[in-house]
Image: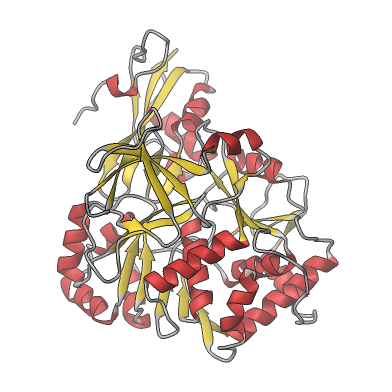
Amino acid sequence: MTLTDLFDLSFQGRRDAVGVEFGDHALTFGEIDARSNQLAQLLTRRGFEAGDRLCVYLANCPEMIDLFLACLKLGVIFVPINILYRERELAHILKDAEPRAVVSDCDIDTPVPIWRPAALAREAAAHDDQRPRIALGGDSPAGIIYTSGTTGVSKGAVLTHNNFAVNALNLTACWRITDADRFLLALPLFHVHGLGNGLHCWLLSGCRMRLLERFDSQTAATVFRDFRPTLFFGVPTIYVRMLDFPLDTARQIGASMRLFVSGSAPLPAQVLEEFRNRFGHTILERYGMSETFMNMSNPYTGERRPGSVGLPLPGVSVRLLDEHGQPVADGQTGEVFLKGSNIFSGYWRRPDATAAAFVDGYFRTGDLAVRSPDGYYTLCGRRSDLIISGGFNIYPREIEEFLQEQEEVAEAAVVGVSDRARGEVPVAYVVLKCAVEPAALERRCRDKLASFKVPREFIAIDRLPRNAMGKIQKHLLPARKA
């Protein structure tokens, strides 16, 4: 059974019910099914076959949902690209994925065609709305999500129909998501959190969803009051922003809500407590990755422990191992290794990276955690120095390499520093060949890198601390001035 078969619970079973709202428009589940069928027919006319890749570089919109569903129905591999990425990052993904085409409203330097979503939608509307009949299996690839890896080079995690399906089935069951829910989705659909959790829980459950282009803290309170959702997925940064809502607004929003979920970055215990006091709800924190979807969750019914990511989800096996590969006792820190049907099939065209990522059939996450005697897991950071800022992964090496391309910079080291709103933000330490203003470095980074990767501060130092083997010792970098 593929994802399309599961989604027929909504496409067929709730065909006339409103499925999604976006702006002033609403579509029923039947219309969503028909639109994606028409688009699948158009993609077939344009030469797409099962296994081809389609890159999509768009902000949240109904057309992005149409494209994803059309790809699922054809066996085409959907490759969403972070809309904040710039030419440098786009070029790598487009070269690596080798798509047949790119769908975007932006002009991109690529050898393959760029199709505009509005034009595609107009042309697709003239096609038959019968669903293509393509033989696919649960292990057929559904999407490729690009994520930073241990080498600093962005790798494509290949996610199958089974991976997506198991994740959605787990979450709808464990979080009690039904067609009675009203789901507000502001997370980007290019990210596993929005695509794998948000979109799939919506389509599987048949609830009513309002899709936002993005979370806007200036208008969010009005949107909550107008739509009166019962279900909301967010990242810690969003919940920090929501603490600024007036108390009466927070209470009003909380009165109609059933469940707030947080993920993609650690949720500070203080934020959880403040949010509970203002909104009357304990945020449910969970733990997932681009390569694995969701691995653990605090229980819907039971203790939602501050600072903890809860218990392994059904079908997920967890090992905590020390640096020698031996199990650690409860209360001791170990690296998280995972096994289950939620785990990705491997990295796109990277057999070396895939082999290195698995040990005895378990995926090596690079995350460190402690398990309590009653089975709750608490994350302690990463074995590598990956920075997670506002739910986005930032690998310092990419920023360091770019900085070292600047003629004034001899060396660079980027570290993550604590930030209340975003969890962490990058800060760059630079050894200069000649004088350069920090503002100039910031402008160059902002031109070439996604905004969340731009260092918040550039600190000039005489030399980088290194050990006897020449490895940079980031923990010995000088403290920032207050």
Q: Is residue 329 left or right of residue 67?
A: left
Q: Is residue 468 left or right of residue 276?
A: right
The number of callouts visible is: 0
Q: Position of residue 209 (x, y in %)?
A: 46, 78
On screen, residue 48 above or below 319: below
Residue 171 visible in the shown view: yes
On screen, residue 209 above or below 48: below
**What residue is rendered at 43% in x and 34% in y?**
442
Q: Is residue 56 left or right of residue 226?
A: right
Q: Position of residue 329 (x, y in %)?
A: 26, 39
**What residue is rendered at 61% in x and 80% in y?**
8
Which quarter of the rendering shows the C terminus?
A: top left
Residue at the extreme left:
277
Residue at the extreme bottom:
16
Residue 246 visible in the shown view: no
In the foreground, 472 or 74:
74
Residue at the extreme top:
468
Q: Quadrant of residue 124?
A: bottom right
In the foreground, 431 or 211:
211
Figure coloring:
secondary structure
**What residue is rendered at 53% in x and 82% in y?**
19
**What residue is rendered at 27% in x and 71% in y?**
301
Q: Position of residue 352 (x, y in %)?
A: 63, 33
On screen, residue 178 above or below 241: below
Q: Position of residue 176 (x, y in %)?
A: 38, 76
In the foreground, 296 or 65:
296
In the foreground, 273 or 348:
348
Q: Quadrant of residue 260?
A: bottom left
Which quarter of the rendering shows the N terminus?
A: bottom right
